[in-house]
Image: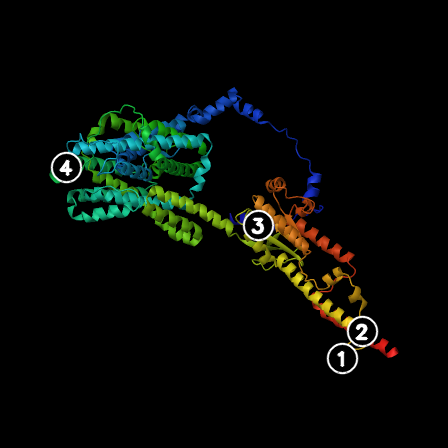
């Protein structure tokens, strides 16, 4: 392998290319190219074309909307079925306890976690494009739902519009409270599903890119802290209120520690035992991953053991341990979500929709890349939208992809969405047939399951060290997302993190890297002169590059950096020229006074000095006198490398035009190199080109521009037979002129 690599490197080093062509500026290049003729379509024609239907087009849209129609007829039963069955059973075994546990996070009774683990999962089989992700309940989304439910329906007070006068005891009150929270959760699922559907149909699948990886990881780490804190009361068996909104973590911890003396020892022992068993099981699965045919389903084992111990020892009555309670048998009848709650829940639903889609599509892309297939982001939005909106009619709360279940589904041999369908059928069997068996399950067991599943998220604290080494800006995004989500709540925290991430984008465009380029000798390759020793600059030519686009936000910094890096400041040169002109005007005026006195004295010395009567000074043209003292720059050409420029707006175009005209006034030619087609079209639309700024200033490459500038410099030096004196030669000329004039005057005086 190393020999092949070395031979490849040698081959590349020995290869050479030689191209002989004219120097191309944009005007010459466009003159030699012929554009393809395109007949522009009217708006009516575009609409007619998009609305035109054919059997092929209808079939394509149908396959896109229902991907199962495309892959199911080609399903290789002998190759895939066994793996999908094993994977479906393994995932379903995890789906059941996690559905029960995450329902507590969503502040709804556990049975609604089972509903959310059946309907959406089954629907995704028909509409999803990923073959490996496991759709269903997820800790972060469940926590966000629970925060909204608690805010809308607090523990102490029922929101305005809800009457509790008929509640005769505490059980009736809590039943009424849970029912109202279920309505909030279900409405959130409906609204977030509608939002996802709309974004999917409008082809807005790209919105997930604004949730950058550091942001998502910082946000989910903070969510893990929220989840862990919310489960402490179930682990300890204490009674506290549930908090939401800003500083909810602080209030929850304070409430738990204030009642730490009322800890239920039996609940704590059961919970800690379950945590130990789950951690041991995960460690065994991790170490013997290759030897085990399927992972040990420790979660369902812990649920079965916990249920058996609770029923056998009667933990509820003997030790006061809280249990899951009544689980209705069978599926509930469809219900329409509470539409009147939509205005109050819209912002929360939008956040849940975007976060849920981001989680799902990121995991789907990972598995698609690993197994060599593609996913459609817009179709994933549609699939999640259907899962959430349709599932809401059957009392499910918002769902998304679960990372832990997806890893199990993929690692146990799952090949297609059939594995997810089988896992949902397992949950259906529990709901219909044996759900009542889990009624004695202690809530502390579910809390243990939730806490152990947060292990992977807590490992994300290691991102701090990673981002510290790689990117301080990404570290800042991670920290802001974590801190804001931790203390402001998940909803406001996410909004703050997204706003900060956008600010970092603006910051990066405001502080780009500016470089002066030079040539690697005997090549057409140009690199940063400050970075490489071999790179050399052409005398009189400066090549300027900025790795950013030119628009209103950075146009001022662009011009400032251009002047600083190149040393060409037209305003300073013009100011120095005006100062020199004024000084020279004063000298002329003084010389004229001396001349008049000399004439009055018939050319004799005045006050011991000779009169200045040089004809050139007396009748010299203003232009010549102006150039005589004009400050000059040793740079005759500036080349702006536009290869990194993606777009230019009207402010950027005006700034660029102003730079070209100002430099022209001080004798510096500005050229633009490597300007892309879209940027050139933008400049044309912005009326950038005119009589003074032509397309001749645009060159195909930096090397073309350099050769053209060298040619102009040589031709200018050939046509100018009497170059202007440099600033250092000015005093010598003045002295020579003074002595010559004095000699003439003295000779004329002696002759008389």
Please tell me how crowded label 2 is: few (under 14), some (14-19), or many (20+) other residues with Cα within 10 Å.
Answer: few
Q: Disc 1 marks which residue?
A: 608
Label 2 secondary element: helix
Q: Disc 4 marks which residue?
A: 316
Label 3 secondary element: helix
Please tell me how crowded label 3 is: few (under 14), some (14-19), or many (20+) other residues with Cα within 10 Å.
Answer: few
Query: Visible in this render: residue 269?
Result: yes
Label 4 secondary element: helix
Labels 3 & 2 near each other (Cβ < 8 A): no
Looking at the image, residue 494 lies above or below residue 132: below
Label 1 secondary element: loop
In the image, 321: left or right of 546? Answer: left
Q: Disc 3 marks which residue?
A: 9
Nearer the observer: mark 3 or 4; the answer is: 4
| Distance between mark 1 and mark 2 Cα atoms | 15 Å
Q: Which residue lies furthest to the front in this view?
A: 600
């Amino acid at each position: 392998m190393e020999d092949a690599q070395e031979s490849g490197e040698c081959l590349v080093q020995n290869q050479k290319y030689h191209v002989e062509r004219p120097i191309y500026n944009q005007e010459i290049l466009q003159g030699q190219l012929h554009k393809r003729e395109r007949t522009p379509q009217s708006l009516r024609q575009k609409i007619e074309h998009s609305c035109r239907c054919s059997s092929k087009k209808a079939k394509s849209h149908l396959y896109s909307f229902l991907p199962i129609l495309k892959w199911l007829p080609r399903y290789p039963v002998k190759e895939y079925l066994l793996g999908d069955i094993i994977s479906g059973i393994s995932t379903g075994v995890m789906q059941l306890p996690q559905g029960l546990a995450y329902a507590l996070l969503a502040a709804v009774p556990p049975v609604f976690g089972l509903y959310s683990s059946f309907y959406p999962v089954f629907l995704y089989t028909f509409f999803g494009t990923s073959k490996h992700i496991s759709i269903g309940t997820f800790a972060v989304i469940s926590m966000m739902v629970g925060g909204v439910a608690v805010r809308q329906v607090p523990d102490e007070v029922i929101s305005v519009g809800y009457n509790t006068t008929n509640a005769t005891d505490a059980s009736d009150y809590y039943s009424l409270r849970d029912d109202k929270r279920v309505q909030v959760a279900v409405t959130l699922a409906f609204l977030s599903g509608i939002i996802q559907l709309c974004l999917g149909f409008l082809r807005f699948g790209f919105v997930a890119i604004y949730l950058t990886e550091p942001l998502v990881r910082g946000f989910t780490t903070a969510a893990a802290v929220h989840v862990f804190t919310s489960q402490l009361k179930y682990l300890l068996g204490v009674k506290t209120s549930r908090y939401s909104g800003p500083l909810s973590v602080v209030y929850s911890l304070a409430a738990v520690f204030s009642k730490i003396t009322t800890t239920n020892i039996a609940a704590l022992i059961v919970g800690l035992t379950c945590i130990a068993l789950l951690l041991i099981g995960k460690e065994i699965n991790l170490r013997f991953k290759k030897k085990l045919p399927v992972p040990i389903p420790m979660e369902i084992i812990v649920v079965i053991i916990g249920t058996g111990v609770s029923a056998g020892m009667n933990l509820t009555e003997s030790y006061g341990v809280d249990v899951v309670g009544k689980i209705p048998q069978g599926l509930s009848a469809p219900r329409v979500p509470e539409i009147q709650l939509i205005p109050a829940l819209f912002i929360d639903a939008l956040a849940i929709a975007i976060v849920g889609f981001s989680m799902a599509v990121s995991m789907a892309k990972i598995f698609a890349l690993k197994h060599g297939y593609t996913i459609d982001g817009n179709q994933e939005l549609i699939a999640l939208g259907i899962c959430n909106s349709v599932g809401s009619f059957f009392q499910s709360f918002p769902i998304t992809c679960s990372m832990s279940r997806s890893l199990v589904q993929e690692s146990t041999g799952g090949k297609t969405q059939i594995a997810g369908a089988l896992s949902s059928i397992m949950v259906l069997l529990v709901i219909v047939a044996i759900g009542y068996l889990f009624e004695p399950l202690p809530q502390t067991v579910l809390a243990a399951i939730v806490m152990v599943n947060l292990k992977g998220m807590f490992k994300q604290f290691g991102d701090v060290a990673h981002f510290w080494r790689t990117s301080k800006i990404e570290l800042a995004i991670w920290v802001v997302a974590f801190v804001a989500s931790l203390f402001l709540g998940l909803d406001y925290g996410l909004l703050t993190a997204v706003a900060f991430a956008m600010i970092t984008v603006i910051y990066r465009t405001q502080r780009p890297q500016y470089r002066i380029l030079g040539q690697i000798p005997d090549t057409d390759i140009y690199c940063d002169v400050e970075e490489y020793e071999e790179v050399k600059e052409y005398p009189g030519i400066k090549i300027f590059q900025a790795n950013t686009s030119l628009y209103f936000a950075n146009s001022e910094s662009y011009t400032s950096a251009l002047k600083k890096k190149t040393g060409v400041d037209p305003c300073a040169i013009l100011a120095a020229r005006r100062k020199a002109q004024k000084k020279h005007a004063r000298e002329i005026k003084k010389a004229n006074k001396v001349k008049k006195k000399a004439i009055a004295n018939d050319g004799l010395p005045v006050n011991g000095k000779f009169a200045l009567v040089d004809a050139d000074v007396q009748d010299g043209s203003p232009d010549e006198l102006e150039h005589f003292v004009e400050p000059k720059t040793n740079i005759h050409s500036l080349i702006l490398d536009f290869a990194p420029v993606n777009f230019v707006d009207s402010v950027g175009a005006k700034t660029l035009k102003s730079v070209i005209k100002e430099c022209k006034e001080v004798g510096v030619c500005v050229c633009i190199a490597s300007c892309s087609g879209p940027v050139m079209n933008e400049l044309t639309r912005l009326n950038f080109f005119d009589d003074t700024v032509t397309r001749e200033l645009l060159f195909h490459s930096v090397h073309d521009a350099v050769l053209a500038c060298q040619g102009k410099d040589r031709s200018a030096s050939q046509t100018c037979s009497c170059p202007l004196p440099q600033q250092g030669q000015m005093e010598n000329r003045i002295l020579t002129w003074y002595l010559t004039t004095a000699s003439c005057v003295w000779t004329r005086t002696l002759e008389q």
